[in-house]
Structures are given as structure tokens and as C-alpha cells.
Amino acid sequence: MPDRFEMTVPSDLANLARIAEFVTDAALRLGLTEQQAFEVQMATDEACANIVEHAYGLGVPGSIGVACEMEGDDLVVTIRDRGRPFNANQVPTPDVTGPLEDRRIGGLGLYFMRKLMDRVVFHHDAQGGNELRMYKRRSP
Amino acid sequence: MEVKARQLKRVDLVEVSGRIDSATAPQLEATLQAIMGQDRFRIVVDMQGVEYLSSAGLRVLVAALKQARRWNRGDIRLANVPPRIQGVLQLAGLDALFHSFDSAVDAVGSF
């Protein structure tokens, strides 16, 4: 069984399903439970949707690289793109408890990523572009 | 994702299946807008076949919910929400905002 699963796709919302299938498959093969694989897939989907919509922009060509591998007991999903740098501090925190009228649900994607994964690390440099690493501990 | 809308006497029943993500959420939005554009605001969304619901899908549902509930004219009620999708709603703190039923019949009958 391979240790590392990798794919590269054009930045396009239509490719989100392919990415989801890839990540779910990789996570299961690397020994995560179905629920964990679902959560990893969800965090990845939210991250990639953000890349398509914000890092590149809809209709702007670019590619997204997604890799899955184990680091010790952690599944690590690494997502790379060459779009605009992402500043997590500029994303509003969604309201998840208020009454309907007050609900702002912008920023929900990033919120999900942080809730579903154990650790989320953003990195940007001029040469490599954006790199997002998300960690999920495999159940014992 | 597949969306099927049926107009019943007082309520519109929307059956969704598959993945509701950033690519497909606009389709769900269009369906809900088409119904509300006819001044019909009592809508049941049957989620039995939904495999995945992203924040984009949640945004569509919440926007439609606000619109339907305006002036007490209607509501968007959920039916047959799969456990995993219920988990997504809970994570977003939205499970408390939606009325949810175990069957489409119960949801339709609740109006």
C-alpha cells in the first residue's frame, strides 16, 4: 500500500467531488474510521472551495495539489495552490449560537476546518505559494 | 446532486440527494427561489439521500429560512436528515434553528 496519496486538479468547483472522493479513499486506506474520513473530506472540501473562490477566484485558472499521508499517528492532508495568500485572521468568526436574524454565517468553512481537524497550519512563501496542512489523529 | 420539487396543496416538497457543495448549492438555491418566487413559503426539504452538506449548502438553507420565515408567512422544515448531516448542522449550531422531522409526511403535516 502506498504511504502517500497525491492528486493535482485544475481549480474548479466541479472538481470538488473528485477531491472529496480521493481524500475519503486515502483516509480509509490509511486506517481512519468512516466518520474520521468524512470529517477529513469535509475539511478538505471547505479548504478547496475557498481556494477556488478566493485564492484564485472563480474562472481563474490554476491548480490545486492535495496529498494525504501519515505522520506517526496523524493523517496529514497537504493542500497547495499558487493563488492569493490567505490571511486566516481576516476571516470573520461565524455566529453559531444566536437567533436566526442575527446569524452571520460567513467564515463557516474555516470554522469547520478548525473544528473537524486537530490542527490547521497555513503557510505562504513567494516560491511555493500557499500550503495548508491539516492534521487528524487516527483512532487507536 | 439531484433536486426534485413537487408542489402539494399547501406545501412544496423538495427532495435532495447527493452532494450539496459549492458547485451544487446554487442549484438547490435556484429551486428554493423558484418556489418562493411564486409566493409559496411552506417548504419541506427531504434530505434522505444527502451524502454531504458543506457550508455553501448551509448558507443556502439559512438564507432561504430567513426569507421563508419573514412576516411569519412560512418556514423551511427538514425531513429524514441522515445522522452525518445532522452532525454537520450541529457543528454549525443550526440544528436548533430548523424544525426537523423523521419523515416527509410528518414534516408536510406539521404546517
Image: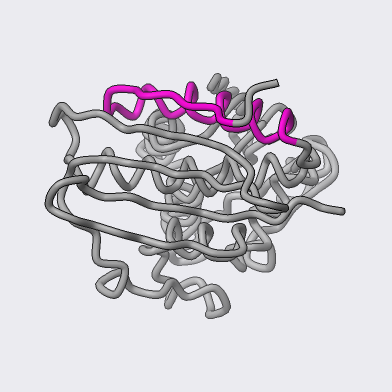
The magenta segment: A4-30
Give percent across and percent down for residue B92: 58, 63
Answer whether residue B8 is visible to the viewer in this image: no
Q: Is residue A105 above or below residue A3?
A: below
Residue at the image position 41 percent from the left and 48 percent from the top: A47
Q: Is residue A139 above or below residue A104?
A: above
In the rendered image, which quarter is residue A31 located in?
top right
Q: How many marks?
A: 0
Q: Is residue B106 left or right of residue B53?
A: right
Magenta-colored stretch includes residue B59: no
Give percent across and percent down for residue A27: 67, 35
Give percent across and percent down for residue B54: 52, 45
Q: Which part of the image, by quadrant, shows the N terminus of chain A?
A: top right
Residue at the image position 61 percent from the left and 28 percent from the top: B16
Viewer-nearest residue: A126 or B74? A126
Q: Is residue B65 left or right of residue B79?
A: left
The figure's colour scheme reads: one colour
Magenta-colored stretch includes residue A9: yes
Q: Is residue B81 above or below residue B87?
A: above
Q: Is residue A42 left or right of residue B27?
A: right
Residue at the image position 55 percent from the left and 37 percent from the top: A68
Q: Is residue A88 left or right of residue B58?
A: left
Answer whether residue B34 is visible to the viewer in this image: yes
Mainly helix, strand or loop, the magenta region? helix
Give percent across and percent down for residue A40: 61, 45
